[in-house]
Amino acid sequence: MTLPKSSSSDDALPAGRIVRWVLLAGVILLSVGLYFRFGLRTPPMGAAPAAGATTTATP
């Protein structure tokens, strides 16, 4: 039993799929960049405030 040959157009990625992967890669790179820009200086969630730090309540 032989399989019919697929046309060369079946092997190409549709433009919509390429755009989706490029956008996904962009979101991942943006989130990694923002993490290294701002995330390294933020305290972990649930961590106690540093000694001597004062907190003020805002109305």
Image (tube, rainbow, N blue to C red):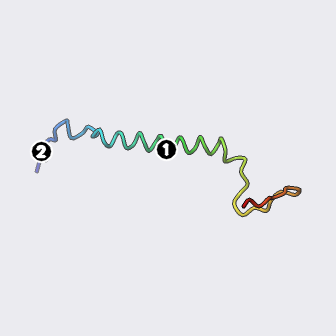
Q: Residue at x 34, y 39 (%)?
A: 18
Instruction: Specify few, some or many for label 1: CA neighbours under 10 Å numbering under 14, 14-19, or 20 or more.
Output: few
Which amino acid, mark 1? Val
- Residue 58 coordinates in the image, percent (x, y): 74, 59
Q: Residue extending furthest front?
A: 59
What is the quadrant of the C terminus in the image?
A: bottom right
**Which one is nearer the viewer's eye here, 5 or 55?**
55
Instruction: Using the image, tell me which numbered label, if any, was put on residue 4.
Output: 2
**Disc nearer the start of the sequence (1/2):** 2
Please state if 34 lies on the left or on the right of 55 as rendered: left
The picture quadrant where one finds residue 15 is top left
**Which one is nearer the viewer's eye here, 27 or 1?**
27
- Residue 16 coordinates in the image, percent (x, y): 30, 42
The kind of secondary structure element at disc 2 is loop
Q: Residue at x 37, y 44 (%)?
A: 20
Name the residue carrying label 1: 27
Please state if 48 lies on the left or on the right of 30 as rendered: right
Above or below, 56 relative to 37: below
Task: Choose mark 1 or mark 2, whichever is in front.
Answer: 1
The kind of secondary structure element at disc 1 is helix
Q: Residue at x 16, y 41 (%)?
A: 6
Quote the CA–CA distance across marks 1 and 2. Answer: 40 Å
Q: Residue at x 85, y 55 (%)?
A: 53
Which amino acid, mark 2? Pro
Instruction: Using the image, tell me which numbered label, if any, was put on residue 38.
Output: none
